[in-house]
Amino acid sequence: MEYRLYNRPDSSIFDLISGDRETKQSKGLGLLLAKSTDIMNSVLRLIFKKVRCNTQYALKSLSGMVYIVDCEMSTPNNKTSGRADIVIRFYSNNKTPAFAIVIEAKSIQRAIHNNKALSQAASYANNLPQLKPFGNNVLVGSLTLFLSIHSTSSKNTFYLSWMEIIQLLETTGKKVKNHLERELIDSFRDFLIKTNNIMNHYSVEVMSIPGRVTAIAANDPNCGIYECPLTKEYSKYSKQKPIFIAFREKGGVIRSLHKLAGIEVLDINDDVKINTIDETGRYPDFAKRIKQYKSHFPAVNGVKQVFVMDLSESITLPYTVKYKKRSPQGLAYHDIKEFFPSSLCQTVVLLNPKKQKP
């Protein structure tokens, strides 16, 4: 099953949210906070770590709390100008107001100073009558693309960055066991990354893959495709987000570092979806490259994880790279500096085997 919006493959619920891009992002985060206690707990831990004198908010869990997440909250009569992006109200199990959080979010596409956003959030906290029952127990924060170098939080205030939120979604999502909840988390993370086209998001620099057979297609200058099954056994292949992929050929030799342009999940013979992705222009000549891949492996079929290389940004290594000892059996992860010689006259670079990331 797949959902598309305006011919765009792999659309999600977050693409349906109305409003401009900035409000889409804050509304999406609000929805996720309301639907995922794992994300709510992770965000709270991040906020509590930043807030000074926060002992009164040191929750161990949300088990004894009821909370309401409001997006675009305004006064009941709408007389006050402006709307608060995200307001979260927490009540004890006897419905007594415990504390509240107000977050002013700025677009992930704009480098706005967090102090400006914090001032707006403070204004909403002081003027919204819905927050009066919480007295001084209101935390006020900003959410911007980056944190300014000289940011300092005072009592009951905090700064968040979208970069921190994306990393939080990445790490928390991996621990969530519920499939639908994990899918919601991953969809919002991907939505944020796609929204900010200038963001290069990755969790490892180089992922080393056994490729005695498959490296032929990845190394083909008219192909640059690698695929593996969409199964539990191979789910770890797309769990990490590398900048480069290194394919280990016979003897564990690595000849190139292939820059990863993206990962698609598709039936390798679904011409409609392949052509749809091709029309987006995300990967130049995508349909032709898939056809070239099938010329190398004509028997390939079924739904796959398809790794698409950036043909113009890959690196051909002018020397031999291999492992000092026996080549790893599965995936291995490395820093890119490990693939380059320490001296100009060095002709062989030896890698140390590394354990797989979880």
Image: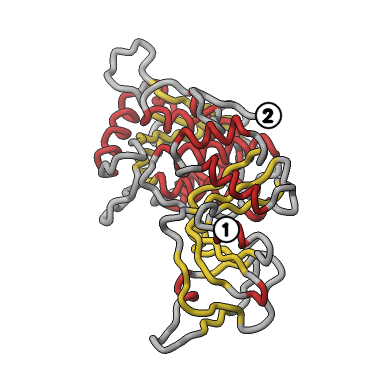
- For badge 1, the amino acid type reads Ala
Residue at the spot 47% in from the left edge and 33% down from the top edge: 279
For residue 81, above or below residue 305: above
Q: Residue 346's x, y, as percent?
A: 45, 87
| Observer-nearest of 113 and 334 | 334
Could you say which disc has been placed on residue 204 in the image?
Answer: none
From the viewer's perspective, is 60 left or right of 167? right
Q: Residue 164's x, y, as percent?
A: 44, 49
Q: What is the crowding at mark 2: few (fewer than 14 residues within 10 Å), some, or many (at least 20)? A: few
Q: Quadrant of residue 340?
A: bottom left
The C terminus sits in image quarter = bottom right
- For badge 2, the amino acid type reads Met
**Label 1 belongs to which residue?**
218
Which sits earlier in the primary sequence, circle 2 or circle 1? 2
Could you say which disc has been placed on residue 1 in the image?
Answer: 2
| Observer-nearest of 137 and 256 | 256
Q: Residue 4's x, y, as percent?
A: 56, 26
For residue 268, above or below residue 19: below
Q: What is the crowding at mark 1: few (fewer than 14 residues within 10 Å), some, or many (at least 20)? A: many
| Observer-nearest of 9 and 182 | 9
Q: CA distance from mark 2 to mark 1?
A: 28 Å
Mark 2, mark 1: which one is toward the viewer? 1
